[in-house]
Image (spheres, rainbow, N blue to C red):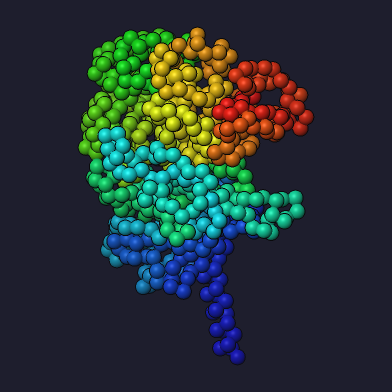
Amino acid sequence: MKKTILSALCVLAAMAVNAQTVSSPDGNLKVNVSLSDAGVPMYSVTYGPTVVIESSPLGLNTTVGDFTSILKLDKASEVGAVSESYDLANAKKASISYTANEQTFSYSKDGKAAFDVTFHVDNNNVAFRYKVYPQRDRLACLVNHETTAYTMPLGTTTFLCPQMTPQTGFARTAPSYETFYDYDAEMGKNGHGRGYTFPALFKVKAADTAKKAKNAQPENVWVMLCETGVDGSYCGSRIMFKDNVYTIAYPEDTEFGGVGQSAPGIMLPGYTPWRTITVGTTLAPLAETTIMWDLVKPLYEASQTYKYGRSAWSWIIRMDASCNYDEQKEYVDFASAMGWEYLLIDALWDSNIGYERMEELVKYAKTKNVDIYLWYNSNGYWNDAPQGPRGKLHRMNDRHKEFAWLKKAGVKGLKIDFIGSDKQQTMQMYEDILCDANDYGLEIIFHGCTLPRGWERMFPNFISCEAVRASENLSFGQHDNDIEALAATIHPVLRNAVGNMDFGGSALNKFYSKDNKRGRKRITSDVYALATAILFQTPVQNFAVAPNNMTDAPAWAIDFMKKVPVEWKDVKLIDCYPGKYIVLARQTKAGKWIVAGVNATKEPLKLKVSMPMLTPGQSAQLYLNDAVSTVKIGKKSAMDITIPSNGGFVIE
């Protein structure tokens, strides 16, 4: 009898170790952790009654051991509550607080510790990462691949951006996160055969019980996959699709000119980046999430207080030919007249203006209260992009010499182009550039680049990354103009939701040309241009407004762009369906809320816009139908608005 009781207790104990649940503080979001009969660690995620990630494997194959199966769950820690409050001046929210629950699961193989998996669960986010242990005398390893997977329920639809083919595109500079999203697509494809970039958006059908629940009838649960905490200690990842399962994939061998390992190397014990899963019955938790920064820490102290602001930029309208002394001086005067803080001078300045005259131009700009950003080519040996200055940043000694000159000349920041890879060697280069630039008080924007993964908090002088099919394509091809509004409906809830985004938009020219009479034609309205200045977020905005707009664009549009903020206290998503429309509000540092929306459909769109952050009866300026008027906010802080096709509205 005692033996039977003891056996039963052993079975129950094993079940307790092998099947655990980590819940969010409100109990609505749950991670279920188990071990399969083959010794494969498994997890699933539920949000309320809806399964959003079905049972999926965890594990890593490394050069010190295959930790993908035949594992044993040794122990599960107690669930611990974690919380933090911090400030972040260069992101979409200025003051951030979170509370979450964490639990760590420790796995072994052949009697030796293999890895831990720590789950971090707050009310709308799940995050997890591995801690890999030494094996005998091995204190470093390569992670050949992960079996980390996301099994999506059947019937899920997707909003994904395909991975670019390495060593393609302009001068072999791909991949750089610059393909078109597919909207409301069925599962079953694998991008262009290379999977999809982060972040990735999914629409999961809500469980029937959720649809019938009293006072709550969500039709869908939205799920966003991403990762954070990637620096030179690991590579960036993407997801591949097969048999309804999305799995973590590392960079391709041919990225970065074929230089560097595809598999990341780590010291032991060592950590992988955090994989993140953000969920909600609306898209608001995705647009408003701070999980990318909650899980990381600053890697160094800021060498100074960095300044943010609005920037003029000639290249998007006038292209390479505008990079000469006289036109850049014209743009300095234009930025000054707009009250903007910066001018970005793009490629070829080293040959068309020169270092000595650039020092002269920087001094002139300072008399106009304008600071200068300069474009740089990143490359040394990984692509063929010919624009200068090139060969200045990839070697530490050359980089320090260049940064010393930039500091001496009074330049405030750099836009660095054509890096195009997620390999660990590339991530180390990003980190090295940012760390060195901080020593010289320089701010950094990256283009032709990877996605920022927590960098706003990790690197105090980081401003933004492009990592999106941005405004340059509006100048290159008419098709991008024809579907321009699509971008505004998805980026605030996906790409821009996880990191600062240098889109370079808000053009007021009718045509992308200096004379505003020929070239690619803008289809969107002037109010749309104003709306995207609010919808798209980065602390230094390089706007496409041009000097000629002072006379050929509506005065109300220029007045708005003169005062448009770029630093924000808070963000609230009001309503959205990617590919159709979006309404979003941002709060200025002074506490004022600005509401903006756009319509990407082919017909006028009637919406009842609920704005609880605004006071009923208060007066506001309404920009709509390419005009501005004074209105009063209605009862219950709501307003009926009809947004024209390819148009927008702003309420301030």
Pick whichever, 514 or 570, lies toward us: 514
* Quadrant assignment for the C terminus: top right
Q: Position of residue 400 (x, y in %)?
A: 26, 29
Q: Residue at the location (75% across, 53% down)?
A: 214
Q: In this view, does 106 lie to the left or right of 356?
A: right
Q: Where is residue 339 in the image (x, y as percent from the top left)?
A: 49, 14
| Relative to 102, residue 569 above or below | above
Q: In this view, does 119 lie to the left or right of 342?
A: right
Specify the quadrant of the image occupied by residue 355.
Answer: top left
| Relative to 621, residue 106 above or below | below
Pick whichever, 81 or 565, lies toward us: 565
Q: Where is residue 12 in the image (x, y as percent from the top left)?
A: 57, 76
| Relative to 260, residue 392 above or below | above
Residue 259 shows in this picture: yes
* Quadrant assignment for the N terminus: bottom right
Query: Please, which residue is most extreme toward the right here?
Result: 635
Q: Where is residue 553 in the image (x, y as percent from the top left)?
A: 52, 13
